[in-house]
Image (cartoon, rainbow, N blue to C red):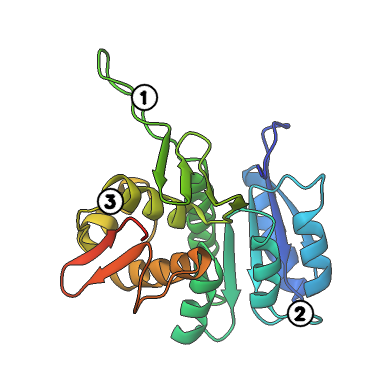
Amino acid sequence: MPDVSPGDGRTRLLMIDDDRKLCRLVSTYLEPLGFEVTCVHTGPEGVERAVAADAHWHAVLLDVMLPGLDGFEVLRRIRAQRTVPVLMLTARGDETDRIVGLEVGADDYLPKTFSTRELLARLRAVIRRSAFSAAAPGSGAPPPPTEVVVGPLRINLDARSALLGSAPLVLTPVEFDLLASLAKARGRVKSREALLDECRDRNYDVFDRSIDVHISSLRKKLGDDAKEPRFIRTLRSAGYMMVEPT
């Protein structure tokens, strides 16, 4: 389901954080730069505003430590209904928090020691990656396939959507591109470096280890088992390969 509809050209940001002073600081910094910032201060209210039928957010800025529901549970509930880019904030900055956030579906992670310039750069990056679309094919070239089918998995490349049987998959932008890349190359190994390069081509801020985290998240959403994979097989020291389910 699309999260953004045409409007007045301002970037609509939902900030879910119980630190009201930080909310005011972020709003004061971003609003002159073309952002429209809406702040809520509890987990349940954040979920309600994020998934509302009339919500058209360009991005969500989400704190980990929240009253009512923690940020990870808020993110799970948002991801069940929306693909809006989510940038998570934490006061702790633990590696475990970052990995859990990525597994749940965060697009990026930022400790609360961030500078305003870094926040702006990260927000623009997650919004840009959400809006990414492949370049048009060259003149005279055959059009690329609009759908890739791997067993019960159907991937619509134009709509950037995927179905497993009749059930839609709720994927982050990075997860969708990794899934599409593996599916288009099914039967052939894709190295981590190749997958990483493809993500970088799309202006994704990813790193080597996060490829494994995103693949793990994909497997969970596909109901896949790393030990007995139906879709994504790991080839040690080589990378990953999409296989036809048996």
Spot occupied by residue 22 in the image (x, y as percentages of width and height): 70, 71
Residue depicted at 26% across the width and 60% down the height: 241
Quick one: 113 or 103, which is closer to the camera? 103
Residue type, numbered disc 2: Leu
Tags 1 and 3 touching, CB below 8 Å: no
**Which quarter of the rendering shows the N terminus?**
top right
Residue type, numbered disc 1: Ala
The residue wearing badge 3 is 186
| Gap in angstroms between the C-alphas marked 3 and 2 | 40 Å
Q: Residues within 10 Å of mark 1 (few under 14, many from 20)?
A: few
| Gap in angstroms between the C-alphas marked 1 and 3 | 23 Å
| Image mark for residue 69 | 2
Quick one: 141 or 51, which is closer to the camera? 141
Answer whether residue 225 is visible to the viewer in this image: yes
Residue depicted at 72% across the width and 57% down the height: 14
Residue depicted at 41% across the width and 51% down the height: 151
Which of labels 3 and 2 is toward the front? 3
Spot occupied by residue 110 in the image (x, y as percentages of width and height): 51, 71
- Image height of 17 relative to 81, above or below: below
Q: Secondary structure at mark 3?
A: loop
Based on the displayed image, in which of its 4 quarters is residue 104 positioned?
bottom right
Farthest residue, direction top = 140
Q: Secondary structure at mark 2?
A: loop
Answer whether residue 114 is visible to the viewer in this image: no
Q: Residues within 10 Å of mark 2 (few under 14, many from 20)?
A: some
Could you tell whether 213 is left or right of 44 in the image? left
The residue wearing badge 1 is 136
Q: Secondary structure at mark 1?
A: loop
Spot occupied by residue 38 in the image (x, y as percentages of width and height): 77, 56
Tags 2 and 1 touching, CB below 8 Å: no
